[in-house]
Amino acid sequence: MKRLTCPMNGPRDITEFQYLGPLRSTRAEDPSAVTRHLFYAGNPIGPLVEWWRHRPSNTVFLAERHTGTDRIIRTWLPDGSETQNA
Amino acid sequence: MPFALLRYGLRRAHRPFDDIPPTPPLRQSYDVAIIGGGGHGLAAAYYLSHHHGIRSVAVLEKGYLAGGNTARNTTTIRSNYLTQASIRFYREAVSLFGTMSQDLGFNVMFSQRGQLTLAHSEATMRSFHLRAEMGKHAGTGVEVVDARTVRELCPHLNMDEGGQHEVLGGLWHKDGGTARHDAVAWGYAKRAAEKGVEIHQRTTVTAIRSQGDRVTEIVTDRGTIRAGQVLQAAGGLNGQIAELAGFPLPIRCFPLQAMVTQPLKPFLHTLVSSANLHTYLVQSSRGEIVIGGGSDPYQLASTRSTFDQKEALAQGALHLFPFLHNVRLLRQWAGITDMTPDYSPIMGASPLANYWLDAGWGTWGFKATPVAGKYMAETIATGRVPDIIAPFALDRFDRFALLNEMGATAASH
């Protein structure tokens, strides 16, 4: 079974986590940025920074994962505004 | 066709024939280049060469013919969608499958035996009533049936009376069916090649060069070609190919996993599907039970299979048909589905004037093979997007004119 390291709870079974999708930044005052934010997420074959949630502890955090190999590169807790976390 | 077959059968000397010619050398220029040699690209090549007289066509396929999602889907053909635009489009797809074997002179083994979607809750029954009414309005054969009718249609099904997944009724889509996926692609390839379409297998597109708003050259690992018009139909790699052309697509890729069992005697006439259990089953003409389709819960570009997805699919299948518990799995696989935000495809214009899109086919692409090919060919030949595919334009996301079909499938998303 695959494991993901929660920054608060350490390595846990990946079925304990909810996938919240790639990190996206937006500016509400710019309409094209809103469209991008809603519909255009990152879809690389390579490293992708994405939001995850550990369900039992409700810990929302960021992870960097390679979408070709499925290797999890690092996980960390968000700090500050959205754009500072990439 | 039957007489030709009879003549062939009675002949003494059987000459072998090649269905699909070997890959020729690349020429310098073509009227149309098609990126992607799957069902959709080959269908478009067929319609271009047979219905529009455009024979200078190159189909560029990275791997082997129809080895991507055309080989990895679960061959469900149906039109029980929710929006009028989708029902109209998929209804024509179903009717084109009805005449495909005759049209192509190639047996695609289309078997129109109906699809039954199960409801395990009152909420699902309500959504089925909506889908049935929308379908009837658009002229497709779909109706809500009660538990008794479900038992008549599918006598071996576990109704789970009093259980957690009790079958309360179903959505019966009598127009639904299945066909042999490889044959669909091979049939189109054979007939297109007869008219001069070149099919270039093992030819990877590495760059797309443009000047102003027009694509000028396509660079491949076997040489560079010029093309008047370009069609992108690259399945799981649509996002990457569009990036080569210089624009983003609203696509996220998830693997969809499926599997087949050993062959059994025929017992399952209809296609059975349950959204609650994220499982659907169909018995192929060889007797194998095809079980689909679990999407991985996060984005991935790898076609490896996982044990937990197989376990979940097996659990759903065993719940519906408990007597399958000793049956062995023969094959299992994954395909990369290019999912769009509204679960509808992207067809028609791109930001480039001579570059056309047939993308975002996610988990719903196989059934659309003939109709997408037909109308993409018309688009390329006339330079105008036909009405029937206009609602699927890429710019619908900028206009917030989405076509939500999220509920119209049993795959787990």
Image (cartoon, coloured by chain):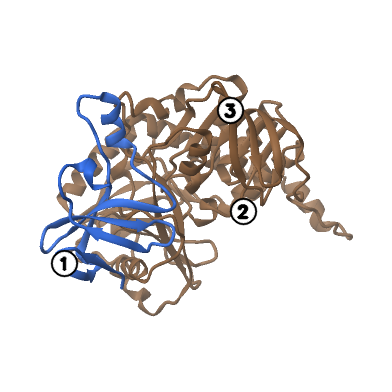
Q: Position of residue B286 (x, y in %)?
A: 55, 65
Residue appearing at x 55%, y 28% in the figure: B355
- Inspect the image, locate mark 3, and give the three-letter code of the amino acid beneath it: Ser
Comes first in the chain, label 1 or label 3: 1
Q: Residues within 10 Å of mark 1 (few under 14, many from 20)?
A: few
Q: Distance between the residues labelled 3 and 2?
A: 25 Å
| Disc 3 and disc 2 in contact, CB within 8 angstroms | no
Q: Is residue B150 left or right of residue B233?
A: left
Secondary structure under tag 1 reads: loop
Find disc 1 in the rendering and name its residue: B163
How many neighbours does mark 2 have within 10 angstroms: few (below 14), some (14-19), or many (20 or more)? some
Residue that carries the numbered disc 3 in the rendered image? B210
Pick whichever, B217 or B344, lies toward us: B217
Which mark is in front, 3 or 2? 3
Chain to which the residue tagged by mark 1 belongs: B
Can residue B212 be seen here?
Answer: yes
Instruction: Check chain identity for marks 1 and 2: say if they share one.
Output: yes
Quarter of the figure with residue B364? top left
Give the mark nearer the N terminus: 1 vs 2. Answer: 2
Q: Chain B is drawn in which colour?
A: brown
Q: Which shade of the palette goes to chain A?
A: blue
B237, above or below B88, in the image: below
- Local SS, label 2: loop
Tell which residue pokes out farthest to the right in this image. B13
Spatial CA span between label 1 and label 2: 47 Å
Location of residue A29 by image quarter:
top left
Discs 1 and 3 lie in a common subunit: yes
Q: Can residue B139 be seen in this view?
A: no
Residue drawn at the location 85% of the way across and 59% of the way down: B14
